[in-house]
Image: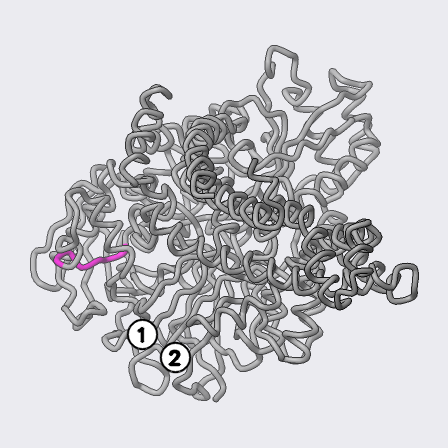
Amino acid sequence: MKIVAAAALSVTALLGGLSAVSAQERGGVMTYGRYTDSLFLDPVLNDANVDIWVMTNFYETLIMSSPDGMTLKPGLATEWSVNEAGDEVTLKLREGVKFSDGTPMTTEDVIWSLNRAKNPDNGIWNFILASVDTVTAPDAGTIVIKLKYPDPTILAALSVFNTAIMPKAAFEAMPGETDAEKAQEFGKHPIGTGPFVLTSWDRGSSMKMTRNEYYWAKGADGKPLPYLDGLNFEVIPDDATRILKLQSGDIDGAEFIPFARVGELKADPNIKMELFPGTRVWDIIMNVRPEINGKPNPLADEKVRQAMNYAANKEALVQVVTYGVGTPLTSFMASSTPMHSGDKPLFPYDLEKAKALMAESGYPDGFKISILTIAGNQDDLGITTALQQMWKAIGIDLEIRQVDNASRTEQYRAGTFEMRTGGWTNDISDPSQITSYFAYSPTIDALHSGWKNAEVDKLFEESQKEMDPVKRAEQFARIQEIFNATGPTIPLYETPYPVALSQKVNGFYQIPLGNNIFTETWLDQ
Amino acid sequence: MASYIARRLLQLIPTVLFILIVVFALVRLLPGDPASAILGDRAVDADVERINRELGLDRPLVVQFGVFVKSVATGDLGDSIHLKLPVTTLIADRLPVTIMLTVMAALIAVVMAVPLAFVAALRRGTAADSTVRGAFQVGLSMPVFYLGLILLTVFGAKLRWFPVGGYGEGFVDNLYHLFLPAVTLAFSLSAILMRNLRSAIIGVIDAEYVQFARSKGLAPKLVLFRHVLRNALISTVALFGLSIGTLLSGAVITETVFAIPGAGRLMVDSIYGRDYPVVQGLTIALAVLVSVTFLLTDLVQVWLDPRVSR
């Protein structure tokens, strides 16, 4: 099998479809309102979306994810191929790429960056490169990655943020003894090949960036990107204030618009209300162990779970909680995930069927059960109070327990929770990550639910070595079929990323994994 | 007086020690740990264990406490787990913002409360009295975030007199940015102060010594300021000192609504993130701050009424 990307396809051409051709204007500084600040800008050692989603502005990967998240496009590598055996990847590096400090990117930087990313002692993302054995450079423009075993996810892995290419010399010149200490310093002033350079960072308040003068990609006018002279992130935690600041023209964009206000902002003539397709899925996770804390667990009964699923009116939840912004799930993974399968909503609302299933189950008279939600989270509260009503109809008495995230995670990991609300976003353009957490029991006991299916476990292991994309898609289709029918969740809905922009902002987008892309963003002057 | 201050400063030491123990224990009694707080649903056992080991959280509590006390004694409060910055740097960046906000709010509260308390007290039972009291009643019962949002919408977004949140750059700009949040924060405090001062003035104004001062032929203004206000203020100053704690907790909400990077927001984020060093360090700093405020209000009380020091 051979995958070759056409080198002739420039990034611009691939992205071009998103914004109107030729009207791009240069200059200006865009201010973007974020709900919280980043924590740690190191691609390898970070562990939060608040970092991951903005790091693409500073650091770039060899391969990149397309705007729709379904395919890969050239990044710092212009073309690549995988050998017949599927255990060796050869990549051609883009010529003339420089880091934001003006030094050229070399094969040494690439080798060092990938070795650092795969080091099992470094951070929580090294599993992404678990198959990588050695990284070498036969010549100044070529990288060869030898794998320990054939890995169908390797190309997608090379587009994940943690495999970003960093300047070895600049990193190693940082004060500190260990990699972690050096990263701590380096992360304060990131140097990468991305379109922007961080000039100041006022923790908890603002990040100021200017355009990277050395950026390699060209805009529609043939001159180097980005179009913007600068980019500012302003931290405005309160949703209402963030929207007010956008409406008063103080900022040009605001992320994480609450669903309740999407309709109102769509109607505002001064605002572009964007809904970028995401891989965000929402569900209720059920503990299906036969006993919880020594007591028999009704959720272990598959008929009970199916009854609860049929009694949960997802269409109503979409309206009540997401104000019509979300769509009912057709599989446990979002429809923008590669190899997603399923075309109709799971467990469409059917109260009669739910009642019949309950009558057949071991709990015909119903039971009392609790659900853990995040205190103060309006979506959680909306979902659970609606479910409380819906499940009353089949004799289930739902007790809502509001806790903070860390407390919930503790009960979740200990397997002592009964139910909880859940949300998930993919970090890689491949179905393997979500499947590993949701369905493959060795990772985290299938969402710490205790659910286990031998066929799913076997299929997943095979899918991780299957180099034929058609066969691999079949494996994932079967996994989804089994999990969707018998799994430990109530699949609710998937949602896009709601971002409100000023009318003068063009060419900004979020990819389904969440990354904010400002490379081709421009402002009407 | 000097010995009084010295005595009070010495009392600070056991207070802070007590707080050290309490905050160290409390933050660890919360369910969950920093690793699962930040990794959330993506947490796998191996990562949680590795992070806890790196942070020294796998060691016995007594050992952890020993390390903590030893570093506090040398002025080192450790590094933030999530922000990877020294806690002392974070406190030096964030706490002054909150102190400025609180001081401004306190000043505004006093400026609003004192004259209006006089008006209400001297015109007791009139329309002016009920208007002042009614207005403050509304201020007292309105949630801080709601009042903040109204002020932001009207004076920020609509009239453009003030910025719509944020902190600005440079001292003067900071004060300008902090004005609306300070008013928001001041409202409920000034309502409490006003009511207290009003009844204190009413209590004093008919006292025998005031009547005596008046019958001596002293100018009414002099009577009002030297005899009435000074005596009426004693309880209000005590109340004011006690309210500083409330004001600081109100700052948490105000900082969120107005997007001000202060210590309140840092504290809330750190508690949710189980960032033990930051929670510990900030609590100590805030405890010292509140203690010093108590000391200052006590000194003012001593000045107003020398009997207090005895």
Name the residue tied to disc 2: A228
- The answer to whether any part of residue A130 appears in the image is yes
Task: Indicate left or right for A247 with B269 as reference.
Answer: right
- Residue at 58 percent across and 31 percent down: it is A487
Near mark 1 (Cα within 10 A), the count class, few <14, some 14-19 or many ≥20, is some
Disc 1 and disc 2 in contact, CB within 8 angstroms: no
What chain does mark 1 sit on?
A: A
Q: Of B15 and A448, which appears nearest the observer?
A: B15
Indicate left or right for A306 with B88 as reference: right
Residue beneath label 1, please? A10
- In the picture as drawn, the residue positioned furthest to the top comes out as A294
**Mark-to-mark CA distance, 1 and 2:** 20 Å
Q: Does the magenta-highlighted stretch encompass residue A60? A: no
* Residue B24 place in picture, x, y as percent: 43, 29
What is the chain letter for disc 2?
A
Residue range highlighted in magenta: A164-169
Query: In terms of secondary structure, what is the magenta stretch mainly?
Result: loop
Which of the two marks, 1 or 2, is nearer to us in this view?
A: 2
- Disc 1 is placed on an element classified as loop
Foreground residue among A524 and B271: B271
Q: Residue at x 57, y 74 (%)?
A: B163
Tell me the SS state at disc 2.
loop
Tell whether position A166 is magenta: yes
Residue for point 82% across, 18% down: A365
- Choose between B70 and A267: the one closer to the eye: B70
Could you tell whether A160 is left or right of A247 in the image?
left
Question: Residue extending furthest right?
Answer: B126
Residue B8 image position (x, y, % from top left):
47, 37
Q: Give me the residue at 46% from left, 51% from top.
A: A338
For the residue carrying disc 2, how many other residues have a C-alpha within 10 Å: few (<14), some (14-19), or many (20+)?
many
